Amino acid sequence: MGLPLLFAMVLHEYAHGWVANRYGDATARLAGRLTMNPLAHIDPFGTIILPLMCLLLPGGFFLGWAKPVPVNPARLGNPRRDMAYVAAAGPGMNLLLAIGSAVLLAVILAVDPTLAAAWPPRPGITPRSDLLGMVLLPIAAMTLYSVFINILLMVFNLIPIPPLDGGRILASLLPPGPALALSRIEPYGMLIIVLLIMLDPQIHVIRTITGTLVNVMAGTI
């Protein structure tokens, strides 16, 4: 589980930095953050402590984040428009990773259809126990988890509350007055987000959206 989550978080931040660099802001590249080396993106709390807490605590959520790449809007060609592109790049990368993982899982299941018995076990169908089966089973499990975690990260980051990507996108689309009002929420944004996560077992917003998207992708396999 840890490898797909780390891969998803690192590429999420890499996408932000790549798009920012593409539109004129080389801050991430000059800081050594335009790299896929996980060590450059590790955030002690978001990458290590929070995933471990989610693993140990009940509730069904398994979240985390990498260290945000630095972005200087003043260096972008069109700051308001380009910041929307930079913010959307992270969730967009997670969507691409989810689709790619779903395609890879479909290929694996085509090679060995009995692996589908593992999710969940089905009467009369037993996954193969030879060398190929032992190799494919953990890869299939990781790709399945990759679909889920990338969709979860995409949905989570698109919540329209700063400092999440959805808040940045919304601020870029709003007129200056409302955008300024939205930016004033940012100091309290993480508290609001934590409350939403805590309340989600009751209101089922994030869980419903994530589950629907996962089921849509699962239905295509």
Image (cartoon, rainbow, N blue to C red):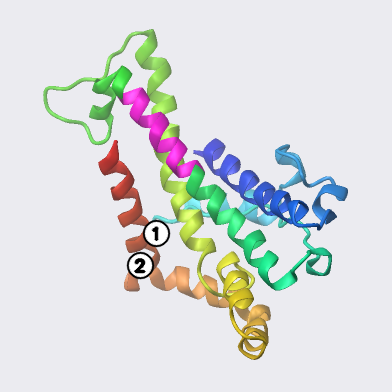
Considering depth in this image, is 203 or 103 the residue closer to the camera? 103
Q: Residue 71 at what x, y percent from top left?
A: 77, 61
Q: Residues within 10 Å of mark 2 (few under 14, many from 20)?
A: some
Q: Outermost residue, right direction?
A: 30
Q: Nearer the viewer, residue 115 or 52?
A: 115
Q: Residue at x 23, y 36 (%)?
A: 120
The rendered magenta stretch, by its main secondary structure, is classed as helix
Q: Does the magenta portion include 1?
A: no
User: Where in the figure is residue 101, as x and y percent of width and height?
Assistant: 44, 36
21 vs 159, left or right, is right
- Picture layout, residue 70 above or below residue 146: below
Which residue has dot 2 on it?
201
Q: Which kind of residue does numbered mark 1 sit on?
A: Gly
Q: Which residue is mark 1?
A: 59
- Residue at 51% x, 65% y is 158
The residue located at (81%, 58%) in the rendering is 25
Separation (CA) of disc 2 from disc 1: 7 Å
Residue span colored magenta? 97-109
Q: Are marks 2 and 1 in contact (CB under 8 Å)?
A: yes
Local secondary structure at mark 2: helix
Q: Nearer the viewer, residue 139 or 170?
A: 170
Q: Is residue 114 left or right of residue 207?
A: left
Q: Quadrant of the C terminus?
A: top left
